[in-house]
Amino acid sequence: MTYFDVFNGDADGICALHQLRLAQPLQSTLITGVKRDISLLKQVSAQAGDTVTVLDISLDKNRDALMKTLEQGAQVHYVDHHFSGAIPTSPNLNAHINTDANTCTSLLVNDLLNGAYLPWAVTAAFGDNLFDAAEAAAQTLKLNSTQIEALQHLGTLINYNGYGTSLNDLYFPPSELYQAIAPYENPFDFIAQSPAYPTLDQGYADDMKQAENLEVYSQTLSSAVFMLPDEPWTRRVSGVYGNLLARQHPNRAHALLTILADDTYRISVRAPLSHKTGADELCMQFPTGGGRKAAAGINALPSHQLNDFIQAFQQQYPS
């Protein structure tokens, strides 16, 4: 029997898997990538008797590979909060999918584990910019404000590490960051002891300092578009900077467009925090687009569709 763990390379995917493997330790084949690399299930070659755990990647984007895996007789456990479309009916599929804008995969895993490793779920929720949900979940932990801020920053750093067009943009490949986190049942011990933490902390600080100089490319009363140059730091910072802008301007939608070398744009969209909906609908209008209600993106928007995107974005979030 072979175990496969397939997970998004962001804070939510990493912390979801970490909770599961703290509860059920086992040796598995890890399959992950940069945050936007979500068509991961096609990398699995599973047979009858194998078990595949899939975390924080859209079922809809992995449907064909999922059906093939199920047909081969493997057991699949699927936990996610992205748009799924119709969920297949199969005795080999155990799916826990909830697309509510105020939850994430790690919070769903936390529910399945009856809160066994709640601090890691809180960390992931902060990383997914679900601050209200994270703070609500953390209430039973009786943490002080300094501890809450530490989990918030840790979630942001893990999420920050997942952004890039390739692994070369990242400080750590997500599989390596997961393995660095794996020994720590307590996130505060990871913060205090792991050499990975100060590396991410310093990188994040440096990149966000540069992001402060970015100017608005196009805006209305209810939306703002930022254009980012094609640099490793912009590819790393696009998601977390979008999250920060969303918190600073909760009634405004944000789109961060990174110009890529092949004359396309990589886009991160954040719905207003006061109305966390529509980001997935917007991005799925374009090829390579997808995500969830509150936050979504487009991997490669052709340059000739730039004006079409901005128009659709402003129509999705009218003044």
Image (spheres, rainbow, N blue to C red):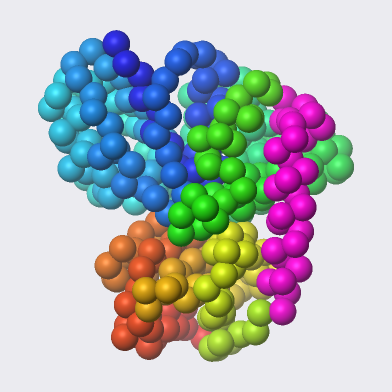
Residue drawn at 60 percent across, 25 percent down: 182
From the image, which quarter does the N terminus lie in?
A: top left
- Classify residue 179 by image quadrant: top right
- Residue 28 seen in this snapshot: yes
Above or below, comparing residue 79 to residue 145 in the picture: above
Q: On the picture, is 235 further left or further right than 155?
A: left
Residue drawn at 42 percent across, 29 percent down: 30
Residue drawn at 68 percent across, 23 percent down: 184
Total labels drawn: 0
Residues 112 and 120: in front is: 120
Residue 208 falls within the magenta-colored stretch: yes
Main SS of the magenta part reads: helix
Residues 108 and 309: in front is: 309
- Classify residue 235 by image quadrant: bottom right
- Classify residue 191 by image quadrant: top right
Residues 201 and 17: in front is: 201
Residue drawn at 56 percent across, 76 percent down: 228
Q: On the picture, is 237 further left or further right than 72?
A: right
Residues 146 and 267: in front is: 267
Read off the magenta span: 186-213
Above or below, comparing residue 265 to residue 304 in the picture: above
- Residue 271 seen in this snapshot: no
Q: Give coordinates of residue 73: x percent, y percent.
A: 17, 20
Residue 55 falls within the magenta-colored stretch: no
Q: Give coordinates of residue 222: x percent, y percent.
A: 56, 81
Above or below, comparing residue 121 to residue 253 in the picture: above
Q: Give coordinates of residue 171: x percent, y percent.
A: 62, 48
Taking the view exactly as shown, the residue that stands out farthest to the left is: 71
Q: Give coordinates of residue 218: x percent, y percent.
A: 54, 88
